[in-house]
Image (cartoon, rainbow, N blue to C red):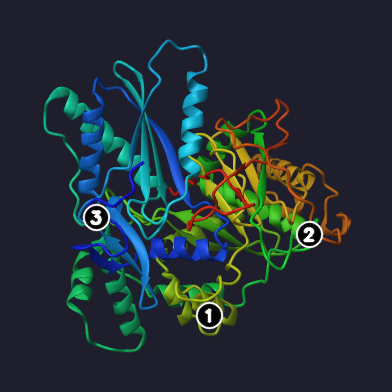
Amino acid sequence: MADGTTGSAGPGAEGARIARAAHGQELVWRTGRRSGGLLLQHVADTFRLDAAVDEEQVRSALAALTARHTALRTSVRVLDGELRQVVHPGIDLPVEFTDLSGPDDGKRAERLAEIADQAAVLPFDPARAPLWRAVAVRLGEADWAVVLVAHQLVCDPASLFLLNAELAELCAAEEQGRAPVLPDRLLDFADHADRQHGRDRYERARRRGRDRRYDQDRQYERDRPEPHADTAEFWRSRLAGRPSGHGLPLDRPRPAVRAFAGAEVRAEFPSGLAAALRAGARRLGGSPAPVLLAGYAALLHHRSGRTDHLIGVPVSGRRGPETLSLVGALAGQVVLRLDTSGDPSFAALVERVRDVASAAWQHQELPVAELADLADLEDLQDVAEQAEPSAGQPPGAPVHQLAFTLAEGELGAPCGYAEDDLLLEVADRAARLVYDTELFAPATARALLDDYLALLAAGLAEPAAPLSGLPAAAADRTPAARPAPATGPAPATGRTPAARPAPGAGGDGRAESFPTGSPGPAGPEGPGEGRSAPSVLLRSTQ
């Protein structure tokens, strides 16, 4: 494996460009610090290449990608108390080659999965570029599989998709002896970060009543795709008076220090639900996402007895045309505050969700440093202050404890960690609930997922029915009827080696539990003795 020294890719790189960290990088850094290095912040995928190319041509294509995208030559470090990205003029290509093109003994797919899993859990040093690696596996004369793994500090899931498409075009051009046809790039990732901070200065000047504008701010005003609202003020009003916690009964007391240990339950959609979801979304005037989120809010309403719910949802961070072909850490997250008061109908709740999500999307770029502007929310200000990279301790509790994501196609790989108390991920015909094993028992997670699917099906069947009239899988499941939380320390979580293929659920649609994980390195700073590295979770950001 390349050591990253060519082109002075280490911390003191000669000729490197020092730039502000992008908001997405600040979010990843803050999350990693909050976890104490227990989260494996990688994105990974395996791409197939149908091209008659040799090793040197594959290496040449990857070199072209590296020269084209500055994020692939970037490391990060803290300078004067602020997170900075260091863009290096050149790096060693972190590429390994493996040949599986011999006679197939029926275990080729298994070997490829093992190669991908091993590459996915090797740690990165954030201060040393590159923060990505590739394993090129020859499967046949014109058949390759390329495993790409990157730290979230320099790459998000949408970037992996772009790299896949560009690598395929570059290899096709090598095979056909022509120039590659690649999308134009209007700016690089470091320029994008500088532009974000120029916008931040503009917003601060607006709040302070200043008329002075920087040249970069004027450029942003000319180029921005739409008028930019005061993002911090929006979130201040949206989060004021927010509830403390989600109110769901816990099976075990919340520990003082989180271990981020996780497991998951999965379930196939019951018969007819996928078709009902598509038809219901059309009938309710939108996409499936608000309908799925409304079902989640209905579940929280039924299980907690509350009417105010905070759910974290990923966003792509690609609002302007200049970001569509950009590789880097653009993905972010917004918090949806969903209101289930007044016993609304399911259709009315979908409309509420759509309005909240639309407003949040318009104000999605909230940098970590700007959280300090929410001074009247003391807990948020504490989080912002502790989130500075130079802080001596990990930052405090997040704004939300529940999360939702919509998968493209199939569910992601099995997940062995829990960044949130609960993460609901929904795909075309299946759903899974990733849960914190220090808080919830497997049976509770299974019941929550079963109830979610039951409530979703009931809401789609009777959209005019109020939430109180929607039956769950077990109508008598109320907070008062749940067993009291256990006392004493949470039991140790059993872990099995990370599995590449995600197991399916039973034919009856009930969820199955899949605790995963594997011994090995943990966190962005290097190996962790006695700890367990979770498998990679590739979240959808669309």
* Point 60% across, 64% down: residue: 400
Q: Position of residue 106 (x, y in %)?
A: 52, 13
* Point 37% across, 60% down: residue: 127
Mark closest to the chain's N terminus, 2 or 3: 2
At mark 1, the secondary structure is helix
* Point 76% across, 45% down: residue: 442
| Residue that mark 3 sits on | 322
Q: Nearer the viewer, residue 161 or 115?
A: 115
| Residue that mark 2 sits on | 249
Mark closest to the chain's N terminus, 1 or 3: 3
What amino acid is at disc 1?
Answer: Gln
| Residue that mark 1 sits on | 381
At mark 3, the secondary structure is helix
What amino acid is at disc 3?
Answer: Glu
Q: Is residue 397 above or below residue 160?
A: below
At mark 2, the secondary structure is loop
Q: Nearer the viewer, residue 318 or 534?
A: 534
Q: Nearer the viewer, residue 227 or 344?
A: 227
Q: Is residue 531 above or below residue 278?
A: below
Quarter of the rendering occupied by the N terminus: top left
Contact (CB < 8 A) between labels 1 and 2?
no
Q: Position of residue 488 (x, y in %)?
A: 85, 61
Question: Which of the 4 image quarters holds residue 227?
Answer: bottom left
